[in-house]
Amino acid sequence: LLDLIEQELKSMPGVVLRQRPQASFLVWFDITALGFEDAHAEFEKGGIGFSNGADFGGPGHVRLNFGCPRERLREILRRMKKVVDRAPGNRK
């Protein structure tokens, strides 16, 4: 599943996977470059229930639990890309 995440992130400028997880199904994305005033709220509106990094001392980050079926993860990443594509930091 992690390979799918890494592949899909290539098409999401402004989203960075800071560290590959070694023993869990949790990934942290640095989304500061997206330029959203409240990125967590933007992803919520897009149908994605990330954990807000600010709650864990990591503002500008969101956490995804990817312990789910591959097709479910594909749908999450599809929704994520829609939100990323409309981010202020990605406007051309």
Image (cartoon, grey):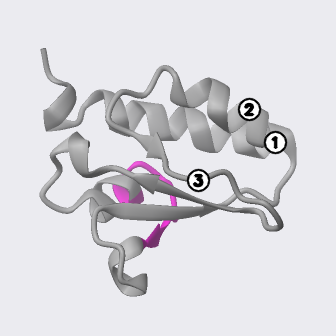
What's the residue type where badge 3 is placed?
Answer: Gln
Q: Name the quadrant of the C terminus.
A: top left
| Mark 1 neighbour class, 10 Å CA radius: few under 14, some 14 to 19, many 20 or more | some
Provide the secondary structure element on which disc 2 rests: helix
What's the residue type where badge 1 is placed?
Answer: Leu
What's the residue type where badge 2 is placed?
Answer: Leu
Query: Where in the figure is residue 86, as x and y percent of width and height?
Result: 25, 31
Residue at 20% from the left image edge and 62% from the top image edge:
38
Residue at 38% from the left image edge and 54% from the top image edge:
43
Q: Name the quadrant of the N terminus.
A: top right
Numbered range of the magenta stretch: 44-52
- Whichever of labels 2 and 3 marks the residue nearer the N terminus, that label is 2
| Mark 3 neighbour class, 10 Å CA radius: few under 14, some 14 to 19, many 20 or more | few
Side of 39 relative to 56 (left or right):
left
Dot 2 and dot 1 residues touching (CB under 8 Å): yes
Q: Report the residue marked by disc 2.
A: 4
